[in-house]
Amino acid sequence: MKFPRLSGWLIATVLLLAVIGLLYPQQLPVSLYKLSLVSMAGVAGYWLDRELFPYARPDEFMAQAVSVGGPFVPKKAVAPSQQIVFAAAMLRRAVIVGCAMLAIGLGA
């Protein structure tokens, strides 16, 4: 069975939220509010990147099949001629998501 993306982070967040609830119950509503805002900003930033750059998604630059198998080895690799473009697309997405999260975090 394949778990959804970021499921490990979700479990860690729930555990930390339980610790906050036990130690400082008065801070639980504030923590939930801020967590929900930052989470929504991350998702909004991701979808904003997908909508702004529909033809420059990072996975579009992965073309070559990888011969080595395993659970953490991707099925495709980046073509040597596309490595810089792939890196730029990944950095672009990270910057957009990070800026969205920072904007919401500073504004809340």
Image (cartoon, rainbow, N blue to C red):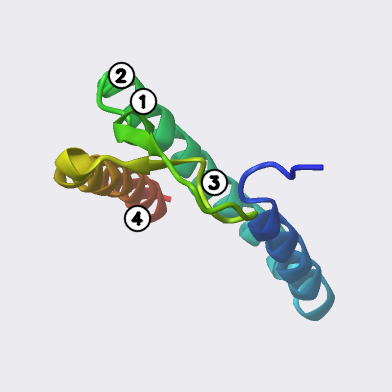
Residue 28: % across, % down: 72, 63
Quadrant position of the N terminus in the picture: top right
Looking at the image, is mark 3 or mark 1 nearer the viewer? Answer: 1
Among all residues in the image, which is located at the extreme front? 67
Which quadrant of the figure has residue 106? bottom left
Q: If you read the primary sequence from the N terminus, does the residue marked by circle 2 or circle 4 appear first?
A: 2
Say which residue label 4 marks. Answer: 106
Say which residue label 3 marks. Answer: 39
Question: For the residue labelled by badge 3, is the local secondary structure a helix, a strand or a loop?
Answer: helix
The reply to whether dot 3 and dot 2 touch (C-beta < 8 Å) is no
**Which numbered disc covers residue 50?**
1
Q: Amino acid at mark 4?
A: Leu
Question: Is residue 29 rendered to the left or right of residue 6?
Answer: right
Q: Amino acid at mark 3?
A: Ser
Question: For the residue labelled by badge 1, is the local secondary structure a helix, a strand or a loop?
Answer: helix
- Residue 15's place in the image compared with 5, above or below, is below
Q: If you read the primary sequence from the N terminus, does the residue marked by circle 3 or circle 2 appear first?
A: 3
**Which numbered disc covers residue 54?**
2
Looking at the image, is mark 2 or mark 4 nearer the viewer? Answer: 2
